[in-house]
Amino acid sequence: MPPAKIYWRLAVPSPLRRSFDYLPSAGSDGGSSPGCRVRVSFGRTTAVAVLLEHAESTPVASHRLKSAQEVLDKEPLFSPELLALLKWASTYYQYPIGEVVNNALPAILRQGKPAEAKGESCWRLTVEGREVKPESVTRAPKQAALLQLLATSEDGLLARDIDAVQSNWRAVMRSLQKKGWVSVETQVPKSKSVLKTDTSESFEGVGSKIATPVLNSDQQKAVEAVTVKLGVFGVYLLDGVTGSGKTEVYLTIIEEVLARGEQALILVPEIGLTPQLVSRFKERFQARYETPVVVLHSGLSDNERLSAWLKAKEGEAPIVIGTRSAVFIPLAKPGVIILDEEHDLSFKQQEGFRYSARDVAVKRGQLEQLPVILGSATPSLESLENARQKRYQLLVLPERAGAASHPEIAVIDVRKQPMADGLSSALVNAMSRHLKNGGQVLLFLNRRGFAPVLLCHDCGWVSKCKRCDAHMTLFFDRGSKRLRCHHCGSERPADPECPDCSSTELRPVGTGTERLEEALALQFPDVGIARIDRDTTRRKGAMQSLLDSVHDGSKRILVGTQMLAKGHHFPDVTLVGIIDIDQGLFSADFRATERMAQLIVQVAGRAGRAEKAGQVLIQTHYPDHPLLKVLLDEGYGSFASKALDERRLAELPPYQYMALLRAEAVNGDLPLQFLRHAREMAEPISAGAGNVLLLGPIPAPMEKRAGRIRAQLLLQSSSRAELHNLLTPWLQQLESSKLGRKVRWSIDVDPQEMF
């Protein structure tokens, strides 16, 4: 009996929600492993696809199938478990499998280039260069600075090392090379695996044992709960108050994982949190491993990202730290997955492939039989409900580690109180007292720029974005006034006079971090101020430089947005002032109060983290708001319990499951037309699929954004299965809809933002 014919089922990057069948490449026996890349002819072009599986049959007539052109990899890039995860993510989030798999590959591999890490350029001083004293290069201060930096390392410096300290240095470096003072060579990455299987190996440095803090009883219980179940799937919700030592729990668990010869994957919400976390991990594990940590985030170059990706895949990286996309990184021997700040909105991708890294991590743990740790001082309501239902094991750290105590929290009622640039006199007096006593002060304001609105005092005109239904924020950029839209990014010089009445009485209304910084400089002229927001941290290394100025005491007042709210340890901060939380109390988004509570607790947690007592002052016009009172009087746990009761009564997540169909177009009539058509197509499927409620279509809360008109249709069900029974056939119909080709539409499963 002749052997069965083999077909290759491929994930081809394409907007179509399906895989594609091909014949094996010429000269191939069809035995290439799933997970390998394959170059194929697709339409009028070629594409780099990934082999998903071998099939013995195909719905397409054999004579119509094309043969694959070539196999690009000898060994698969994805394990069977990781391929299963990618297929699950495609199905659950209703996104094309080709795009999902493509998303999981570094850019260089998407182009079909070899899965080999390129060498990195390394610059070092020549013999002649070491004889040059930087202070003698008086006419070229940038060259002098580079010479001084290179003199700090005998082994030379890589691009990322120099980027962390200086910007726009490459042209200067070329000048030094022409003078013969600097040489450059390519370092080829090592390929030897560093994973150990000898569990008897101790964590000792060169000549001395690494000092590790002694765990308290709650930390020890949390560690033991996880380590006794290594190699077994389980989800652990680590609910620890700020400063309770969650990171130390992570580190101790990772020690056990590495002792088993396995790897640890740690996901963090934002790139801004990685420098402090990476340095903490390196300090603990540097003595045992030459490269204990690799980092994956959007700030890396393509070559750096590929190098980190391959080190993780080959087992050269015992610890991988990354933002949400790292949840798909291949690991040679995975041992544990940890999500820090699991509640954070940054774990949900909001464009294109709209996935939740938290939920994908849980699924990956199930497929690979790993423990998954979700850590937070303010767990999401979804995770708390899963713990209530015993799906997750709850581990609680109720007290701060060491001698630190909980901060004293008080509300400042600013009704009828004089305010100067958003500051009440009570807050200013408290700042003076804490600064006088040697403490640092952190002020939290979640609004960038100088002022959120520019207003005409004579006629009431306000600065609106021409492309969005939003106000433009006023910024002072190097002395010039500019208006910027935070939604579409459009920018223009601030109007010198009112466009409506020609008045020059244009006034900034409201307070942003820029204005607050300026006001504080007048109030406290002799105190260093550090403003930490997206505008001051754009340049590479700027965030670390600002944090260093806080830790060395040269900056004693910190002003910032939610970038300051999580993950940072400021031992000398004794006062935290929250400038304005009222916008979170009254919002059309049902998740607004949950996020407000999380921000308050996270920001408050920056105070009194060492031996010094901490104080938190919250300015508000609504001191008697019931949820705010519960949060401040009884804590986040009681707040979350009452919020969950409200969600249950209102039939909202986590007790209901949602999907949001969005549509947008330049023609303002088309989005609603398309969504009405989509609803008509969904109604007969819904009747057979089960209990799925169709709400809308309606214009989006922000109807106009970036020059396009937007609308949305909400689907809601008490059954996740019934919702997906509708989504799968419905979206296939929408793909072939003629009206669907006239708009830009997308589906968001488990949406976290409704605008």
Image: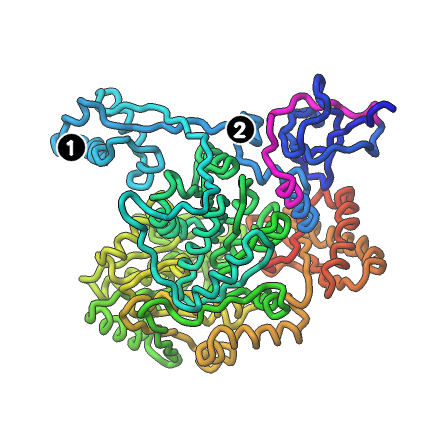
- What residue is pinned by disc 2? 115
Q: Nearer the viewer, residue 335 or 471?
A: 335
Looking at the image, residue 618 sits to the left or right of residue 140; the answer is right
Q: Nearer the viewer, residue 254 or 282?
A: 254
State the image coordinates of residue 176 (x, y, percent, origin top left).
24, 25
Sort mark 2 into few (<14), some (14-19) or many (20+) by Cα contacts within 10 Å: some
Looking at the image, residue 486 sits to the left or right of residue 699; the answer is left
Decide: marks 2, 1 in contact (CB < 8 A)?
no
Q: Is residue 247 magenta?
A: no
Residue 503 in view of the camera = no
State the image coordinates of residue 563 (x, y, percent, origin top left).
40, 57
Residue plotted at (23% across, 71% down): 432
Q: Which residues lie in the magenta part? A: 62-85
Q: CA distance from mark 2 to mark 1?
A: 41 Å
Q: Where's the N terminus, which quadrant?
A: top right
Residue 206 in view of the camera = yes
Amino acid found under the numbered disc labelled 2: Ala
State the image coordinates of residue 285 (x, y, percent, origin top left).
37, 47
